Every structure is written in C-alpha cells, then in structure tokens.
Amino acid sequence: MFKKIKFLFLTMSMVVMAGLSSAQASNDMIIEKLSPLSFEETIERIKSNAKSLGWKVPKSWKKDFQKNLKKVTKEDVGRNLVFSMCEPWEAVKLLKFDEYKKFFAMMPCSFAVYEKSDGKVYASVMNIQMLGQMYKGEKPIEDLVNKLGPQMVKMMDFE
C-alpha cells in the first residue's frame, strides 16, 4: 500500500512540475523557435506565412544589427535580421482611440531571425498575448491580441 501511495505521489509531482514548466514557457515575453530551415529560408517562410494570413510585409522595414553594431562597437553579435510587419485592419481598430495611441511605440510587429553560436537558426517574436494579460477587460486590446497573437506564432511554423 505504501509503495502505491509513494508511486502516486511521485507521478502527481511529475505531472504538476510538467504543468508548471509548460505554463512558464507560455509566459515568456519573447517567443523563440528553432528553425530547421536556413537563415534565408526562415525569413522567407515567416514572410510567406504572414502574407497568407493577410498581413502586410513591407520590403523596407528591416534592420541588420550585426552590421550596425559592429560598425559602432567593433563587436560582432552574429548574423541576424529584424523585420516588421503589420495587420493594418486590426491595428486601426485599436489605434483610432486616443487612449491606445501609446501602442504606436510597439508597432509594427517585429520578428527576428538569427544564428546562435551553436550555428542553428532561430526566430523570435514578442508574445502579445502576454501583453494582453496586462490589459484584461480592455476589449479593443483583448480582441487584437487574441486574434493576432496566434497568427504571429503560426507565422513561425516551419513544418
């Protein structure tokens, strides 16, 4: 009987720990995903996924921090590209209100693709659904993050 209780306790502990660990991952402010694709293919896949979801992907909204930081600091942060996209129809629903104009500072949405020292390619994006938790009860924000948050994660689908 004692062995059964001990086994049950250990099993329940593992389930709780797994739940806490996955809950922690979903509460990260930045979502990062390993890409099985090359650097260029990863960028193109994110952009293609975004376009298929109706987002606007301007060609000129991009930054290369490797080049810029190396020029100023002489330090090499590694290969990267940060590019921005917008879902204008959803953005305007929020930004037309004076109380939400402060969110211009976070727009357009930025994605980053970079190589780490392990030689692998990664992509990251801000977790806007976590941001939405800070504004519970504010329907325009909740509507935006609940619609666009899952889309942003879907854009980093590399399968």
Image: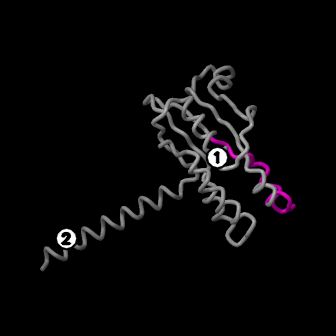
Q: Is residue 142 above or below residue 54?
A: below
Q: Nearer the viewer, residue 131 or 109?
A: 109
Which quarter of the picture shows residue 123?
A: top right
Say whether residue 110 is magenta: yes
How dense is the environment of label 1, judged by Cα within 10 Å: few (below 14), some, or many (20 and up)? few
How dense is the environment of label 2, judged by Cα within 10 Å: few (below 14), some, or many (20 and up)? few
User: Residue at point 56% right, 26% down?
Assistant: 79
Outermost residue, bottom direction?
1
Residue 131 position within the rendered picture, expressed as x and y whole percent measured from the top left = 65, 59
Q: CA distance from mark 2 to mark 1?
A: 49 Å
Horizontal side of residue 71 vs 97, given as left or right: left
Horizontal side of residue 68 vs 10, given as left or right: right
Residue 116 position within the rendered picture, expressed as x and y whole percent measured from the top left = 49, 32
Residue 118 position within the rendered picture, expressed as x and y whole percent measured from the top left = 43, 30
- Amino acid beneath label 1: Ser
Find numbered disc 1 in the image and state the secondary structure of the residue it sits on.
Answer: helix
Q: Nearer the viewer, residue 139 or 150?
A: 150
Q: Is residue 38 above or below residue 152?
A: above
**Magenta stretch, main secondary structure class:** helix
Q: Which range is magenta?
A: 94-111
Q: Is residue 79 above or below residue 24?
A: above
Q: Which residue is mark 2?
A: 7
Quarter of the image where the N terminus is located: bottom left
User: Residue at point 55% right, 26% down?
Assistant: 78
- Amino acid beneath label 2: Phe
Say whether residue 58 is magenta: no
**Mark with earlier residue (2, 1):** 2
Outermost residue, front direction?
52
Find numbered disc 2 in the image and state the secondary structure of the residue it sits on.
Answer: helix
Q: Which residue is mark 1?
A: 52
